[in-house]
Amino acid sequence: MNKNNRLQNALFYVVVVFISLVVLFPFLWMLSSSFKTQTDIIAWPPKLIFSPTLQNYAKVFGEQDFLKYFINSTVVGGLAVGLSLVIGLPAAYAISRFTQRRLALFILLARLMPGISFLMPWYIIASRLDLMDTYVALVLSHMLIALPIVVWIMSAYFNSIPVELEESAMVDGATRQYAFWAIILPMSGPGIITAVTLSFIFSWNNFMFSQVLSMEKTKTLPIAVYNFVSYAEVDWGGVMAAAVAIMAPAIILTMIFQKFVVKGLTMGAVKG
Amino acid sequence: MHKPSFIEKNIRILFPLPAFLFIALLMIFPIVYTLALSFTSWNLTSGAPMRFIGLRNYGQILLEPRFVDAIVRTLTFTICAVVIEAVLGTAIAIILNRAFIGKSLAKLLLLLPLVSTPVAVGIIFNLFYDPTIGLANFALSSLGLPQGLWVSSAATVIPSLIIVDVWQWTPMITLIVLAGLAGLSEEPFEAARVDGATQWQVLRYVTIPMVMPVILTAVILRLIDALKTFDIIFAMTGGGPGYASETLNIMGFKYSFEYFRMGQASVILIALFFLVLLCSMGIMKLRSSSEN
């Protein structure tokens, strides 16, 4: 390697490290602040070295009942994703095998349209039907987040499975729905992991639907974090501990399923 | 061959039916309902019965300076954020598009902002921007620059919010363009090199034109989401100070769930709806012309 090349290489790594630091910095600051006492947080100049404390986490999980909101978020996200798979997988299969383009576009509308344009009627209807602050209303609204993701990812995934597999089963006398159930679905693991991870993360992060449709009983984590700020404007340590608590599951899921998440986020754009 | 059952004969309809009904009932019907409400005088707090008032809500809202400001602000925020993200995101993708030690770690880091809860991201940046204890002002003063008020001042609130959006969503453009670059065939690059093209020329005349459709698709996706940006603005400023960061989405939310003026809120929501529709159609047209 000549000198010029080596210099270029070093420069490249400097740029990569710089980009990584910019991306990482807010996370590191959040994490370090969550272990600081209030005095250390408001210290000027900002402190890099401090004696860590767990009091913020004790407060968040002890006094603020974050465990309940954590469970709420998990239940709502889990049910919304599960039900979206139940109705989304057959729809994705039909879109893929019978090239139902218009249907695909129709379901994708839920991804494109601003949530607020249907949230107001939801609010009115939910109040009339006594569905405010129930899991039913919340899960249904979160399905509007999960369903388009499931259909989008799975129809592309089914496209990549050769038609001959079901066709040969059908020649042997199997029905199409049996072939879908017994041949196609068992092969669809990677696609389903992608769809489930992404749609769960987006449901987990959703703020607007839960802010309008949930109150104390079904409150999800983003709302709890948001309320924490408005109640305790100055308790930065507690807020940062809450932020860590809400981000950790999505980040852990992303680390485990990195390949799947990247694929899910980029496939539509690259193929479409 | 057996005789096809009812399910098998109608599978084309039966399989997608539940999903179709779900979207129709829970999304399309409410949107139509919103449209209908926009012609009524309905106000949830007054208790007066719903009355048909024709286009009066439209007249009132369209003449409201707050509404016009919100439209301009929504477009400013969206266009600035998405242009910066597209340029930065593509540049970073082109830099990272080679084999290097730690590439998969770098890609993992790029994913983290995308999966972070926007409300929490907003709150973290609020700590950054805090005029008295925030790192942003500390950085400025260590560089000898005057300190700023960031989201607390009407003059700087929009740029400050754009910075947050750029931090969170530039990686998405990068990852999409990286995937696009990975799918390109080698031949045009070899041909260009054989012809003696410089690195810059290859980039300018081969790489960028070839990934343009992918970049534009990424831009469409970002544009649609940026127009709808709600969480970070609501969490960081609530639309303030005053109305200085009130976008259409925030204004619609306030009219619906703070003032309960359902009729007028519907007009705002319909405006946002058409803005999203218009922008997506415009960019799709651009994209199809770049492919030809």
Image (cartoon, helix red, strand yellow):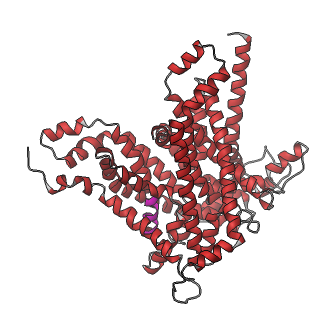
Judging depth in this view, the residue of B126 and B249 nearest the camera is B249
Residue at 55% across / 20% down in the picture?
B189
Q: Position of residue A42 (x, y in %)?
A: 81, 56
- Which quarter of the figure is the N terminus of chain A placed in? top right
Q: Position of residue B150 (x, y in %)?
A: 79, 56
Residue furthest top as drawn: A2
Residue furthest bottom as drawn: B48
Residue at 38% across / 64% down in the picture?
B24
In the picture, measured across the screen, residue B22 lies left or right of residue B214, that is: left
Judging depth in this view, the residue of B35 and B55 nearest the camera is B55
In the picture, measured across the screen, residue B250 lies left or right of residue B11, that is: right
Residue at 54% across / 49% down in the picture?
A250
Judging depth in this view, the residue of B235 and A72 nearest the camera is B235
Q: Position of residue B256 (x, y in %)?
A: 58, 74
Q: Position of residue A118 (x, y in %)?
A: 49, 67
- Which quarter of the figure is the C terminus of chain A placed in? top left
Q: Which residues are magenta?
A: A136-144
In this view, A240 is above or below B179: below
Q: Main secondary structure of the magenta part?
A: helix
Instruction: Kindly tell me whether residue A13 is visible in this rendering.
Output: yes
In this view, B250 is above or below B111: below
Instruction: Kindly tell me whether residue A75 is visible in this rendering.
Output: no
In this view, A225 is above or below A260: below
